[in-house]
Image (cartoon, helix red, strand yellow):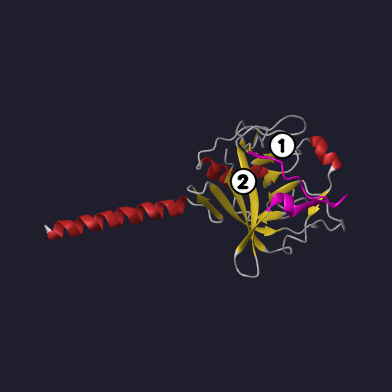
Amino acid sequence: MKRCCILLVLGILVALSTQISSQEKKATPGIVVDKAAGTVTLDVKIAPRVVLKEKKEPYPLEVIATWPYPKGKKSHETIVNFDESIKPSDVHKALESLGLNAGKPIKGIGEPQGPAVNVYLLVPDSTGLDRKITLDRAMVDAKNGKPFPKNVGWRFTGSVMLQLDPNKADKSYGADNSGTLMSIFPVTDEIVLQTDLTIKNEGVMKLEVNTKVLPKEGTLVKLVIEIAKK
């Protein structure tokens, strides 16, 4: 009887070990999914604001997170970079694992569709703890010094699918081509998340990083995407 119990316990331990090992293999390094909290967290770095040699002044911000230069197509207009080993479609799948279903992105005129999410940064402070910085504090309008509006909503739109080879019918996840995760304005639909701002806003807002709040370029921080509470 005692031996049977020992064998049963060993069997359970092996099964749990196999299950954990399987989950670890499926997990994408640099992405943490917390189903209880309803969050997806990415390891990111504060991006350089000038990456093109011919430019001395930074381009206004149009996106929040991209692959670094030169692979990230919007890397000259972003707040943070994430590692190229992470595909935007990995983040899409992580959000789906929280029970969210992607909507529909827009480019130019229109209204994005998809479930609402909150987005913020976790920045280490002098105490060693993470300090929460919402995006309205992370950006300012360079023309007037006003912060990014608090009431701007974010939506899990998902990306358009692209036919990269005209000779093949296969289509791929567009954001995996651009390396762009989140767009502030509807200047691209090759993204995973998009705000409800219009293309008209892009013409009147000249957004820049709030250096009084965010740490220096290259600092490791975390980008958190959270299911919006109803």
In the image, is residue 169 above or below residue 38? above
Magenta span has 221?
Answer: no
Q: Which residue is mark 2?
A: 88
The residue drawn where x is 50% and y is 39% is 99
Q: Which mark is residue 196?
A: 1
The residue drawn where x is 61% and y is 30% is 169
Residue 214 percent across, percent down from the top left: 72, 60
The amino acid type found where label 1 is placed reads: Asp
The amino acid type found where label 2 is placed reads: Pro
- Mark 1, residues whose alpha carbon is within 10 Å: few (<14), some, or many (≥20)? some
Residue 197 percent across, percent down from the top left: 75, 37
Residue 67 percent across, percent down from the top left: 68, 52
Q: Which comes before the other along the chain, label 1 or label 2? A: 2
- Give me the C-alpha separation between circle 1 and circle 2: 20 Å
| Quarter of the view holding residue 128 | bottom right
- Mark 2, residues whose alpha carbon is within 10 Å: few (<14), some, or many (≥20)? many
In the image, is residue 173 above or below residue 59? above
Q: Which residues are magenta?
A: 134-155
As drawn, is 136 to the left or to the right of 86?
A: right
| Quarter of the view holding residue 227 | top right
Question: Is 115 in front, or is 9?
Answer: 115
> Would you say the residues marked 1 and 2 are in contact, meaning their CB atoms lie under 8 Å apart?
no
Q: What is the quadrant of the C terminus in the image?
A: top right
Q: Secondary structure at mark 1?
A: loop
